[in-house]
Image (tube, rainbow, N blue to C red):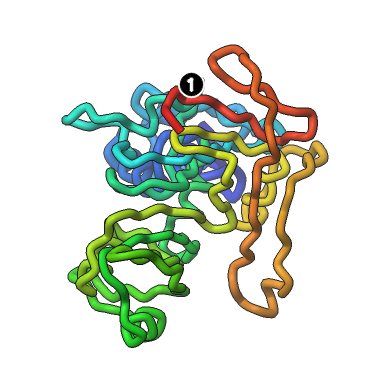
Amino acid sequence: MTEQNETGPQGERLQKILAQAGVGSRREMEEWIVAGRVTLNGEVATLGMRAVDGDVVCADKRVVHVKGEAERGLPRVLLYHKQEGEIVSRDDPESRTSVFDNLPKLRGQKWIAIGRLDFNTSGLLIFTTSGELANRLMHPRFEVEREYAVRVQGEMTPEQMRSMTKQGIELEDGLVRFEKLSDEGGEGFNHWYRLVLKEGRNRVVRRTFEALGLPVSRLMRVRFGIVNLPPSIKRGKMAELGEGEVRMILDWVGMPADISEPPVQARVARPRAKPEASKERVEVEIVPPKVRKTTGRRGQADMSRASSHRKIKTGAKS
């Protein structure tokens, strides 16, 4: 191993390479390196080491062959419409249905869930093979918006609605404030609201409404960052984004796209104001085009020529 790989400016840090390969988060990979679970070209690695094209990084039993930027290609991104009664975990002592059960199989990579949803929450889940992309969409410092539709038992007062977008409310783990909140109406005892948060604390929406004396009877995530849950993806179904949409997401989070083929067309709703002027995150709606359902290998649906997605059947009921 050369000194340049360890301390020089060339190459990439091992924790970043492993995260991009989907082995785990950067922080987790740093812990693995400190624990001696990572090797670089056969030698036990230490924090600060870098690898270049042709190096071999091993993390436990996972082997990552470092490739140059031209060889990496784009990460894969899946949109999944989670149903209530599914967990966002690979390991569950109760053996409940997992969102990972029906994802497409990968070689040398793994699917990373971007932002968890609890057992009784439905809606948009994003999966990617890029640890770096997952980190940029989930890390609190990036303040990526999450939008939810929530049905509660009861109704907020005008004072509560004003307070939740201005002062917020203090929970046991800190202050919660909605970026946006709108009254969507309702019938009888149930009332619908739509809200936007820039954080993903555990059960934060449910706990907030419970603190207001309004138990949540249904909760659904409808947007994560610039990606909306398309109406064409029914419950328990998923769609893989095409190159054009993946490039848009990478550009939005400030990550370079490594391959140079021209992007495919995608349906995009452009914002009126420039992000520099508004200093707000651009909300680009990524909507899959209609697909022509046919029977294919492994249960995948065939695409129409204009489609830039692969729609994948999971066998769950819509």
Q: Residue at coordinates 79% horizontally, 29% vertically from top-left?
A: 305
**Of the pair 65 and 142, the residue shown nearer to us:** 142
Identify the secondary structure beneath mark 1. loop
Residue 264: x, y in percent?
Answer: 78, 39
* Residue lying farthest to the front in this orientation: 188
Q: Residue at coordinates 33% horizontally, 87% vertically from top-left?
A: 159
Q: Residue at coordinates 39% horizontally, 30% vertically from top-left?
A: 100
Residue on which disc 1 sits: 105
Seen in the image, is 245 located left or right of residue 194?
A: right
In the image, is residue 35 above or below residue 140?
above
In the image, is residue 177 above or below residue 315?
below
Amino acid type, mark 1 = Lys
Q: How crowded is mark 1: few (under 14 residues within 10 Å), some or many (20 or more)?
A: few
The picture quadrant where one finds residue 270 is bottom right
Seen in the image, is 112 located left or right of residue 70?
A: left
Residue 138: x, y in percent?
Answer: 44, 54
Residue 221: x, y in percent?
Answer: 43, 53
Q: Residue at coordinates 69% horizontally, 27% vertically from top-left?
A: 292
